[in-house]
C-alpha cells in the first residue's frame, strides 16, 4: 500500500507530469514549561533545536502548514489557559520551513484584539503567510481567499474555528468562525478567483477524543459536497482518523479529522505527539488538478532532560533513552492502532 504513492510519484517525475506536495501538521502550542525552557538570561527566547529532527521533511515539501495556537507579541508571555508567546516562536516555525500559519483557533483572542493584531503585524513583518484572522472586515474582504501558486497549482487556503473560549473581538478584529453559509460562499469565491484546489482548515471537535464526533462528520460531509478538496482538522490535541474519499464524479477529497499536537507540554500518552500528513497533487489526462494521494508520519515531543535544555521533536525511529523510548512507543502504538483501524486510503509513511 505504501509503495503505490511512491511509484506514482516516480512515474510522474520520469514523464514530467507536474506535482505539488503539501505537508500539514497540528497544533503548535506554547505552554509555560516551553516558555521557561526557551527563555535566555538576557530575556530573549531561543527555540533552536526544537524542530531540527523534522525540518528535513518539512523543507522538502513544496508548501507546509501549521496551526499556531497562541498569539505572539509583546509580553507578558504566558501559557495555559491564556496563551501569549514571544515573536521568536513564530520565527522558529518559519525557519523550520512552514510557509503558512493558521491563526483561527480557540486561543487566538487570548490577548484580545490587541494580541490578534500584534500576531498579524509580526507575521507580516516576516512575510509569513497567514489566514483565519484579520485586523478588520475590510482586510478580510481583501485577503480571503488566500490563494497560492504552488508548482503551477492554484491552491486556496481557508481557516475557521468553532469558537474563541467565550472571548469576543471588541475593537473590530475579525475571526473566521465555522459558519456553513460563510464557508460555502468562501469556497465559491475561491473557485471564481481561479483556485484549482480548495483547502479548508477547521478547528473543531472534542478535546482528547480519538474519534470524530457527529458534528465533525456532518461538517466534513458538507465541505466535501461543497467542493472542498482538502479538509484539515485541529483542536482535539490527539490524532483522529483520516479519510480519502471519492466523489461521484471521481474526484478525491481528503478529510483529516485531527492531526493532534505538533509540539506541546501535554503529558498524557495520546497528547505527546501528532501526525504530519503529506498530500500530493497532480493533473489528470485533461490537465485538471486533483488530489493524487496522501500519507502520514508521526512526530513526538521530548521535554528537556539532562542532555537537552529545550523541548524538541523527534521522528519515529531516532534512538531514545528511557523513559522517552517507552513513552514514545506507547504513543506510537495507540496512534498506529487507531489509524490502521479507521483510516481510509491514507497509509503510514516512515521518515
Image (cartoon, grey):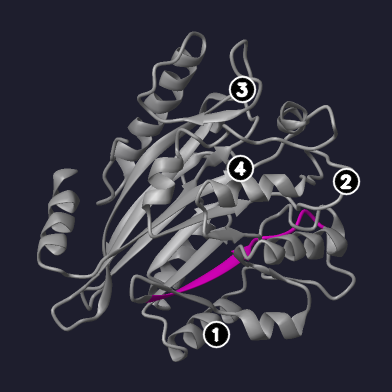
| Segment colored magenta | 154-166
On screen, residue 236 versus residue 42, left or right, reads left
On screen, residue 158 versus residue 134, left or right, reads left
Which numbered marker is on residue 78? none
Q: Which residue in the structure is indicated by mark 1?
A: 185
Q: CA distance from mark 3 to mark 1?
A: 43 Å
Which numbered marker is on residue 75? 2
Which numbered marker is on residue 207? 4
Q: CA distance from mark 4 to mark 2?
A: 28 Å
| Mark with earlier residue (3, 4) | 4
Q: Is residue 29 magenta?
A: no
| Mark with earlier residue (3, 2) | 2
**Most frequent secondary structure within the magenta stretch:** strand
Q: Residue at x 30, y 58 (%)?
A: 244
Identify the secondary structure beneath mark 4: loop
Determine crowd level at label 4: few under 14, some 14-19, many 20+ residues with C-alpha closer than 10 A.
some
Amino acid at each position: 500500500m505504501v509503495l503505490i504513492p511512491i511509484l506514482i510519484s516516480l512515474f510522474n517525475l520520469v514523464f514530467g507530469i507536474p506535482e505539488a506536495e503539501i505537508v500539514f501538521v497540528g497544533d503548535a502550542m506554547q505552554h509555560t514549561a516551553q516558555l521557561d525552557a526557551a527563555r535566555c538570561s538576557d530575556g530573549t527566547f531561543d527555540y533552536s533545536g526544537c524542530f531540527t529532527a523534522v525540518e528535513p521533511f518539512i523543507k522538502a515539501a513544496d508548501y507546509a502548514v501549521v496551526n499556531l495556537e497562541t498569539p505572539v507579541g509583546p509580553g507578558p508571555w504566558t501559557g495555559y489557559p491564556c496563551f501569549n508567546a514571544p515573536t521568536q516562536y513564530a520565527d522558529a516555525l518559519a525557519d523550520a520551513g512552514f510557509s503558512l500559519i493558521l491563526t483561527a483557533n480557540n486561543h487566538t483572542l487570548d490577548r484580545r484584539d490587541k494580541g490578534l493584531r500584534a500576531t498579524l503585524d509580526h507575521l507580516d513583518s516576516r512575510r509569513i503567510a497567514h489566514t483565519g484572522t484579520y485586523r478588520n472586515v475590510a482586510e478580510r474582504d481583501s485577503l480571503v481567499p488566500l490563494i497560492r501558486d504552488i508548482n503551477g497549482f492554484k491552491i486556496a487556503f481557508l481557516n475557521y474555528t468553532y469558537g474563541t473560549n467565550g472571548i469576543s473581538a471588541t475593537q473590530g478584529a475579525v475571526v473566521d468562525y465555522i459558519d456553513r453559509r460563510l464557508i460555502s460562499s468562501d469556497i465559491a469565491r475561491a473557485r471564481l478567483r481561479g483556485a484549482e484546489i480548495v483547502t479548508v482548515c477547521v478547528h473543531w471537535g472534542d478535546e482528547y477524543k480519538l474519534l470524530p464526533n457527529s458534528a465533525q462528520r456532518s461538517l466534513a460531509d458538507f465541505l466535501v459536497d461543497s467542493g472542498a478538496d482538502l479538509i484539515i482538522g485541529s483542536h482535539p490535541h490527539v490524532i483522529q482518523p483520516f479519510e480519502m474519499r471519492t466523489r461521484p464524479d471521481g474526484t478525491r477529497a481528503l478529510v483529516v479529522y485531527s492531526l493532534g499536537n505538533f509540539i506541546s507540554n501535554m503529558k498524557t500518552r495520546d497528547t505527546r505527539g501528532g501526525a504530519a500528513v503529506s498530500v500530493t497533487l497532480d493533473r489528470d489526462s485533461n490537465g485538471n488538478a486533483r488530489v493524487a494521494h496522501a500519507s502520514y508520519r508521526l512526530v513526538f515531543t521530548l521535554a528537556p532532560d539532562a542532555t537537552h535544555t529545550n523541548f524538541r521533536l523527534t521522528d519515529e525511529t531516532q534512538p531514545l533513552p528511557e523513559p522517552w523510548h517507552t513513552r514514545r512507543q506507547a504513543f506510537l502504538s495507540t496512534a498506529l492502532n487507531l489509524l490502521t483501524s479507521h483510516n481510509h486510503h491514507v497509509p503510514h509513511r516512515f521518515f
